Amino acid sequence: MSTKRYDVVGLGVSTIDQLMQLDHLPAEEEILRADAYSIQGGGPVATAIVALARLGARTAMIDAVGADWRGDVICSEYAREGVDTQLLIRRAGHTSPTALVLVRRPAGTRTIVWSPGTAPELTVDEIPWSAIDQAAFLHVNGRHGDACLRACEYARQHDVQVSFDGGAGRYREETRRLVPLADVCIVALEFAALYTGEPEPARAGPALLAAGPSLVAITDGLRGSWVFARDGTFFHQPAFRVDVVDTTGCGDCYHGAFLFGLVRGMELRRTATRASAAAALNTRALGGRKGLPTLAEVDAFVSSPDRCQPGGVAFEHGGY
């Protein structure tokens, strides 16, 4: 384990997710009754950080949220999970990001409608440089623009590893500049294909390695994930078969669990297996965080031959 204060510090956007479970997605002017409702924190980097904390890692989150009831819930949930909230900035007179997530049963697939809130993004001058110094990893997905870029550059200059999350639907030209700064690059197949021009994981992975990262994982839902390392290691990690309630946050959980394995010095195949298992376990509850597993739950799942069957749960890095 790292001797630094934090295993992973995240820099991204924290949201409030309002989730409703439905039999089908609404048509125009249709009124539907939800089978279940939940309100909880969300956001790709944010959920990965909570996943890490649930597994036992030392974490903190860098973000700016509104000084509203949503911001209160965001901060209190972090604190309850053991995530250090000292790096969060509250914007007086502003609102925090909110997402409405409609989850279709029984498949667990979802549609997300997102409102960014009014809180301005972090500026470069607001980055807590000393906290980054105290981290083994800085985990980002490109949000907060120039501040994110500068934080990644600073991390690389100060021997802090950078982890980049490239999600489905989140490829933009400005995110290209983050891939060469990443030590660990975990991306959806769609992102990998758009970045490299290679639609197949076996070709996209080496192309991403050539861009700068020393470790690459490409995720593709039911098809599992492909892992590539600069030392020539390459393997496919199947997804696991589980009964799905909701796939929200599964890709973020995968990323958090993968980083946990790296922080703990796990062998790479064991790390990928546990990341895939954690993502599968996260589908058992409505929302991106209620199903986040503990380390004991992941270990029990992986070691149980009756429950641990490759080939089933779909997840992607997507969203807001």
Image (cartoon, rainbow, N blue to C red):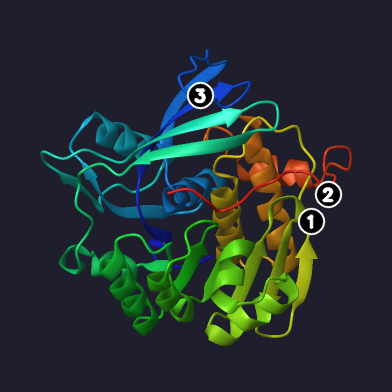
Place of residue 54 in the rendered image (x, y in percent of width and height, measured from the top left): 52, 43
Relative to 170, say whether 302 is above or below.
above
Query: How many marks on residues?
Result: 3
Residue linked to disc 2: 310
In the rendered view, would you say 135 is above or below 43? below
- The residue closer to the viewer here, 266 or 244, is 244
Say if mark 2 contacts mark 3, CB within 8 Å.
Answer: no
Q: Which residue is mark 1?
A: 238
> Residue 37's spot in the image, x, y percent?
49, 20
Residue 315 image offset from top left, x and y in percent: 65, 48
The residue located at (76%, 76%) in the rendering is: 234
Quarter of image, res 193: bottom right
Identify which amino acid the numbered label 3 is placed on.
Met
Marks 2 & 1, CB-CB < 8 Å contact: yes
Secondary element type, mark 1 = loop
Query: Label 3, on which residue?
Result: 20
Q: Nearer the viewer, mark 1 or mark 3?
A: 3
In space, the residues marked 2 and 1 are separated at their CA atoms by: 5 Å
Residue 307: x and y, percent?
83, 38
Q: Residue furthest front?
A: 28
Q: CA distance from mark 2 to mark 3?
A: 29 Å
Residue type indicated by callout 2 = Pro
**Position of residue 72 in the picture relative to residue 161 (left or right):** left
In the image, residue 309 sits, relative to residue 209, either above or below, namely above
Q: Give the structural element (helix, strand or loop) at label 2.
A: loop
Answer above or below: position of 296 versus 126.
above
Q: Is residue 219 visible in the rendered structure shown here? A: yes
Between discs 2 and 3, the one toward the N terminus: 3
Task: Work out how far the residue at label 1 is from the one at label 3, CA to CA, in angstroms.
Answer: 29 Å
Q: Nearer the viewer, mark 2 or mark 3?
A: 3
Quadrant into which the N terminus falls: bottom right
- Counting residues from the start of the chain, the first of labels 1 and 3 encountered is 3
